[in-house]
């Protein structure tokens, strides 16, 4: 790629813009909490939603940074507000109904969050019960660090020292290091005083005791200090003093904090919430996965890295292929419902609502 950027800008912003131009209607900050099943167990008849925030007008998820449409890191406070504590629960919830609000459902919610949402499917269909019981997931740890020195000066002795490597299976808190310096050009730093390197670390983070992301991330931040002080030495030997101490001043910090406090200026995050957990492919579990077109429910199709998509590991390739299989599986419905699918097409063309 000539102009290298991050995933949000390369994949998600362009996809959003294309779909928007085709008339797709997006709704943000609404969580699906329940799928209702018909008495016969063959159709999804309702989708229950919980609105996490109040949105003023049509939410714009992109912000332009250095001329590039970027996906926002947090909800934009200028476009959203928390619900007042006095708000009635009914106002925050909505039930979409089959035939009135939707025809087909594509379930693309991550594996770790499916069980409560799909409780009726699990109770009614043994196949669903088996799949949900055999979709293992793990919490993950991640850290993005900005440095004052370029990647070629850290002392990495393996291949690709000038451009920066991607290293996996490393021991310690984070087992993966990827040089992400190519994203710097788009982060709006001053060329003179800004960082010279971006390092991305991640790893599985099995069963942290804290259930919330904030508390688990706090613990991870403390462990990350030890990672820099001790574990990283074989990969970045040049950033340690003769006495073996990590030189904290190599971490970039716009606020000029000293010592290990510079970790406060890095991005450290534990992904522990059910929908953030990484999908694993344990031996003997793949046979329980369903193909995107084989949910066993007439109007329900599946997409995501947790489906049986041929690759069957947690990665973007598996996710994309699951989406293609899902679209393929929906074709017969579109052909057998030409009037309804033509109506959808017309809405795409005119941008009109349903
Ligand atoms: C730390 C980490 C590093 C990774 N690194 C790589 C990598 O380098 N290369 C690679 O190929 N893959 C990587 N992966 C894996 C990759 O991110 C996943 O395989 C991929 O994102 C899965 O796509 P998905 O659409 O199935 O799920 P997601 O990307 O998780 O998308 C699901 C969407 O559903 C939304 N959602 C969740 N719950 C609800 C709900 N109740 N109602 C409505 N919406 C909901 C979420 O907000 C999210 O937008 C990594 C994963 C992790 C955790």
Image (cartoon, rainbow, N blue to C red):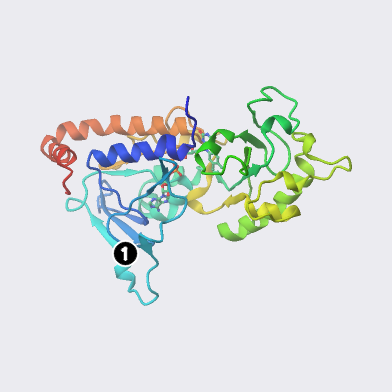
Q: In this view, does 72 lie above or below 215?
A: above
Within-10-Å neighbours for mark 1: few <14, some 14–19, many 20+: some
Viewer-nearest residue: 274 or 61: 61
Q: Is residue 347 above or below residue 39?
A: above
Viewer-nearest residue: 149 or 286: 149
Identify the residue at image location x=68%, y=54%.
256
Q: In this view, does 252 lie above or below 317?
A: below
Viewer-nearest residue: 49 or 280: 49
Residue assigned mark 1 = 93
| Residue with the most extreme front position | 192
| Residue with the most extreme right position | 243
The picture places residue 43, in percent across and down from the top left corner, at 25, 47
Identify the residue at image location x=75%, y=48%.
248
Left or right of 251 on screen, residue 4: left
Left or right of 108 on screen, residue 273: right
Left or right of 322 on screen, residue 178: right
The picture places residue 23, in percent across and down from the top left corner, at 22, 42
Beta carbon at label 1 within 8 Å of ligand 1? no
The number of discs equals 1
| Residue with the most extreme left position | 339
Left or right of 16 on screen, residue 232: right
SS for tag 1? strand
Q: In this view, does 267 lie above or below 155?
A: below
Instruction: Confirm whether residue 283 shows in the render.
Output: no
The picture places residue 316, in percent across and down from the top left corner, at 47, 33
Viewer-nearest residue: 99 or 16: 16
Instruction: Confirm whether residue 106 shows in the render.
Output: yes
The picture places residue 222, in percent across and down from the top left corner, at 71, 55
């Amino acid at each position: 790629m000539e102009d290298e950027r991050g995933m949000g800008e390369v994949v998600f912003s362009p996809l959003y813009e294309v779909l928007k131009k085709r008339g797709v209607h997006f709704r943000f900050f609404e969580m699906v909490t329940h799928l209702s099943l018909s008495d016969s167990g063959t159709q999804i008849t309702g989708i229950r939603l919980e609105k996490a925030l109040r949105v003023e007008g049509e939410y714009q998820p992109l912000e332009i940074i250095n001329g590039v449409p970027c996906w926002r890191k947090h909800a934009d406070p200028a476009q959203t507000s928390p619900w007042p504590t006095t708000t009635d629960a009914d106002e925050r919830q909505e039930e979409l109904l089959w035939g009135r609000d939707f025809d087909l459902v594509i379930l693309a919610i991550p594996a770790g969050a499916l069980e409560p949402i799909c409780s009726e499917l699990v109770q009614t269909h043994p196949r669903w019960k088996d799949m949900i019981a055999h979709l293992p997931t793990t919490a993950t740890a991640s850290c993005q660090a900005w440095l004052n020195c370029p990647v070629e000066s850290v002392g990495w002795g393996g291949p690709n020292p000038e451009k920066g490597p991607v290293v996996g299976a490393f021991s310690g808190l984070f087992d993966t290091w990827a040089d992400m310096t190519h994203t710097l050009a788009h982060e709006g730093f001053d060329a003179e005083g800004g960082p010279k390197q971006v390092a991305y670390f991640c790893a599985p983070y099995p069963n942290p005791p804290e259930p919330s992301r904030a508390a688990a991330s706090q613990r991870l931040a403390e462990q990350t200090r030890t990672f820099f002080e001790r574990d990283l030495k074989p990969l970045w030997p040049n950033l340690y003093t003769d006495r073996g101490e990590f030189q904290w001043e190599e971490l970039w910090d716009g606020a000029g904090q000293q010592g290990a406090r510079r970790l406060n200026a890095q991005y450290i995050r534990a992904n522990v919430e059910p929908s953030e957990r990484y999908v694993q492919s344990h031996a003997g579990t793949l046979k329980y996965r369903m193909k995107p077109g084989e949910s066993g429910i007439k109007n329900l199709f599946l997409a995501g890295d947790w489906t049986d998509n041929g690759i069957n590991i947690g990665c973007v390739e598996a996710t994309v292929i699951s989406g293609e299989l899902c679209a393929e599986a929906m074709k017969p419905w579109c052909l057998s419902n030409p009037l309804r699918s033509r109506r959808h097409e017309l809405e795409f063309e005119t941008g009109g609502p349903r």
